Image (cartoon, grey):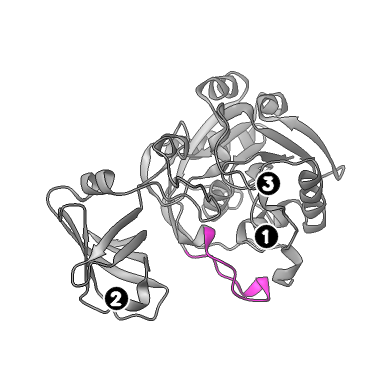
Amino acid sequence: MHISDFDYDLPADLIAQTPLEQRDASRMLVLDRRKQTWSDSNFTEFTRYLRRDDVVVVNNSRVIPARVTGHRDETGGQVEIFLVREIETEVWEALVRPGGRLKEGARVIFGDGRLIAEILDQPGPELRRVRFHCEGSFDDCLAELGSTPLPPYIKRPSGVSPADRERYQTVYSKHRGAIAAPTAGLHFTPEVLAEVAQISSLAEITLHVGYGTFEPVRVDDVAQHSVSGEHYEISDVAAQTINDARANGGRIIVVGTTTMRALESATQDRVVLPGKGVATLTITPGYSFKIADALLTNFHLPRSSLLILVSAFAGRDFVLRAYRHAVSERYRFYSYGDCMLIL
């Protein structure tokens, strides 16, 4: 299939620029894969679709303040570094802007000099290698000097607000390491989670959302695209909860494409294996899903690997028709937008 097969028209004013005041106030488009129908609903109705033996699986990764802005040591010019993946202690792959002007050995100063970045390679690759030097804890420096890495399609006059540090995290986020939020989970509140636990089961896994999740698809043939690896961890308890639910006839309700990728990567013979790993699986139409029975997900960018994954789960034509309906009904799109539940 061609990447152009996963395109759709979206008016710019439907791209959510701010979160709703209440997390669970989002609209929810409910898709029935068997009947090939959909219905307009609200996220407050999510638990109505759960059954007693189901398990809802969420990604508890926590977003780090991965964007830091400083100045060149030699010229004073502004430089932005967006952390992507830690290679070793205090050495990261990063997006550097303007990356083409910074040669190996260039230094970037942040704040009062407590944090310094040293470029370790020559211009060329999109991702540069950067070593950080800091006074005290690197995590503490990053927390003080870094900002929430909101997606580039969120364009506000004031940019990132202090509230984004809290709202661009799920209420169940625990383990630091993601450079983007697992956004399907942003709709949950403690009250909704309590309702989930009363009706069915809840399992938490961790996949640190990395560059692969939002990296553009640069090939025409989607079968040739490879999503970069992302680290995940599934505890013994979580794996047992999921496997018991499946054994008892329950459904695995996956919250988010990152959770989906972790589970499908960790499944063998339709059994989820506990442990740490790297999700290298790229899901495209034709993929046979091993563990997931339903998916809660936000609306994704055209021509993205996430839209391709959702299309693999529910069917490209069906998904794009549902997207056109969402546009006509003026749903809010992307990270701070509304969601769809695919059954």
Mark 2: secondary structure? loop
Name the residue at the left extreme: 135
Q: Which residue is mark 1?
A: 302
Q: Position of residue 127 (x, y in %)?
A: 39, 71
Specify whether 81 is left or right of 71: right
The residue shown at (37%, 71%) is 98
Pair 1/2: label in front: 2
Find the magenta span and give its range.
214-228
Q: In the rendered image, which quarter contains the N terminus?
A: bottom right
The residue shown at (24%, 78%) is 104
Q: In the rendered image, which quarter contains the C terminus?
A: top right
Q: Nearer the viewer, residue 153 or 190?
A: 153
Q: Main secondary structure of the magenta part?
A: loop
Task: Name the amino acid, label 3.
Answer: Leu
Q: Position of residue 20 (x, y in %)?
A: 58, 32
**Residue 230 location, quadrant:** bottom left
Of label 3 and label 2, which has the lower sequence position?
3
Pair 1/3: label in front: 3
Q: Quick one: label 1, few (<14), some, or many (20+) residues within 10 Å? A: some
Q: Which residue is mark 3?
A: 14
Specify whether 89 is left or right of 223: left
Q: Quick one: label 2, few (<14), some, or many (20+) residues within 10 Å? A: many
Mark 1: secondary structure? loop
